[in-house]
Image (cartoon, rainbow, N blue to C red):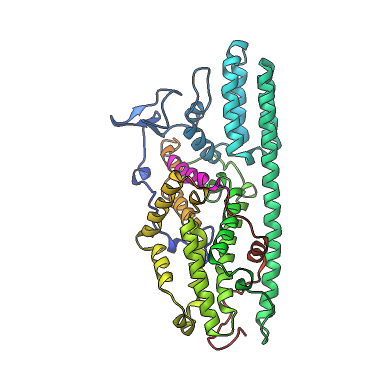
């Protein structure tokens, strides 16, 4: 069945990435670091966070101190990503940036600034590159420029570099805005097409329209174009959307939420879920459209081959959408049609996406695709597009299964390390540029072709009524 952003409780399962020790509580007064020798107290900003000992819990102030660079310390990149991803649950980005600005004020003596400047610049660059939407707010830009004016007088090279950072940030924000505008246009055209088809569906004469096989009859080509759409959607999803999608008031957190419902931006994530649902219904529509069983069987076989090509490419999201579309009730009940189709390959693909064992087969295939991506020389072998609904459910369970704060008020940082691991892996995959040539006619059809609703009646020996 088509997926939704927030799955119902009855359909949940335990994600394989969930670590049981994360559910344990910590009552130590000081931040706790784990290593082979047992728990230790944090030894200040220089403690290694990417390898060896790792912070499992600490006060928010301590975590912020670990983020702030000094003349002889810079936080590990993994820590910067983890903290910036999760900190928005406890402190707003403008407030966090203001803390950094205060640190600049304290270290503005010339000798210290010459050493401190490049490091604060590096941190700000990482922030703008990974979380550019944080800087949509005027307050953030103002704080950013305030830090610039404190650093720039020390060295002309700083000023030039900072201007480049601001220019790159401006370009990223413009691209994000353009992407959101495209999403609105695609959604509007899709809604219009759906409305037209539902009206035509109720007529007794078959609607006059093109069908997929008249636009593209090569499974590999269609799989390539589906991969284009998947990667385009992925490119717009920011890591912060995974946190904001499931934000809720923590019972152990006495502070107010850092952003209201209006500021919970999950536009791109929701658009990607809508695309999955659309592809499900499009597959079902294409199968149900032909009047004759033989033609419907041919369409079924075609989409089975498309699904197989998606699997070979590493496009698991389109693969699952196609399988889901074929399993929708208007299609699955066409027993005579299925009897005429060659379905051996379909059952193999279904086995790969079988939910048994918490999608064990799929997760094994995903690990294989990820390994291939790391070692591949060809860009075509580097593509990894995960089954997005399962990724969302994994993150949902991680969020639900562990409190953000421990009873002693410390931030449960081990939870966010695991969250950052899952989101970080996704961020690596989404940066892949599609190596296939685009076919605008196919892409246009995939985005705008009218689709039936699931409750429409389809009979074996009749056109839709």
Residue at left 63%, top 34%?
94
Residue 30 vertical position relative to residue 259 in the rendered view, above or below: above
Quarter the C terminus occupies: bottom right
Taking depth in this image into account, of 381 and 68 the one nearest to the observer is: 381
| Magenta region, residue range | 417-433
Residue at left 66%, top 15%?
154
Residue 8 % position (x, y): 48, 62
Residue 121 vertical position relative to residue 114 in the rendered view, above or below: below
Taking depth in this image into account, of 1 and 33 the one nearest to the observer is: 1
Can residue 39 be seen here? yes
Left or right: 257 as drawn, with respect to 157? left
Residue at left 57%, top 77%?
455
Residue 178 vertical position relative to residue 196 in the rendered view, above or below: above
Can residue 454 be seen here? no
Left or right: 140 as drawn, with respect to 73? right
Which image quarter: residue 108?
top right
Q: Is 113 contained in the magenta span?
A: no
Residue 281 % position (x, y): 57, 70
């Amino acid at each position: 069945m088509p997926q939704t952003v927030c799955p119902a409780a009855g359909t949940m399962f335990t994600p394989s990435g969930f670590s049981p020790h994360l559910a344990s509580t910590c009552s130590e007064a000081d931040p706790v670091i784990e290593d082979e020798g047992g728990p230790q107290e944090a030894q200040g900003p220089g403690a290694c966070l990417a390898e060896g000992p790792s912070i499992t819990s600490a006060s928010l102030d301590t975590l912020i101190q670990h983020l702030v660079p000094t003349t002889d310390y810079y936080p590990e990149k993994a820590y910067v990503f983890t903290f910036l991803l999760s900190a928005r649950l406890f402190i707003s980005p403008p407030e966090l940036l203001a803390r950094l600005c205060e640190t600049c004020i304290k270290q503005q003596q010339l000798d210290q600034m010459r050493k401190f400047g490049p490091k604060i610049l590096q941190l700000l660059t990482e922030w703008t590159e990974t979380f550019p939407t944080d800087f949509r707010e005027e307050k953030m830009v103002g704080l950013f420029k305030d830090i610039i004016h404190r650093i720039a007088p020390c060295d002309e090279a700083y000023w030039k570099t900072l201007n480049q950072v601001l220019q790159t940030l401006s370009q990223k924000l413009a691209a994000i805005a353009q992407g959101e505008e495209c999403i609105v246009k695609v959604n509007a055209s899709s809604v219009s097409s759906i409305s037209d088809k539902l009206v035509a569906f109720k007529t007794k004469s078959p609607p006059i329209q093109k069908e997929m096989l008249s636009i593209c009859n090569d499974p590999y080509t269609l799989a390539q174009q589906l991969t284009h759409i998947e990667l385009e959607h992925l490119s717009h999803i920011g890591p912060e959307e995974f946190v904001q999608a499931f934000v809720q008031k923590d019972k152990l957190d006495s502070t107010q939420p850092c952003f209201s419902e209006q500021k919970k931006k999950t536009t791109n994530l929701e658009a990607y879920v809508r695309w999955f649902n659309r592809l499900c219904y499009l597959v079902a529509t294409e199968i149900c459209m032909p009047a004759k069983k033989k033609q419907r069987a041919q369409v079924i076989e075609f989409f089975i081959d498309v699904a197989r090509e998606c699997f070979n490419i590493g496009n698991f999201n389109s693969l699952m959408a196609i399988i889901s579309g074929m399993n929708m009730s208007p299609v699955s009940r066409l027993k005579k049609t299925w009897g005429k189709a060659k379905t051996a390959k379909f059952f193999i693909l279904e086995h790969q996406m079988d939910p048994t064992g918490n999608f064990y087969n799929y997760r094994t295939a995903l690990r294989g695709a990820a390994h291939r991506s790391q070692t591949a020389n060809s860009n075509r072998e580097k593509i990894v597009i995960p089954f997005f609904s399962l990724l969302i459910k994994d993150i949902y369970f991680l969020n639900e299964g562990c409190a953000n704060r421990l009873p002693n008020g410390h931030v449960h940082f081990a939870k966010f390390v695991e969250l950052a691991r899952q989101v970080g892996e996704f961020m690596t995959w989404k940066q892949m540029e599609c190596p296939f040539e685009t076919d605008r006619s196919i892409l246009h059809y995939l985005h705008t072709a009218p689709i039936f609703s699931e409750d429409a009646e389809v009979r074996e020996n009749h056109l839709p009524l």
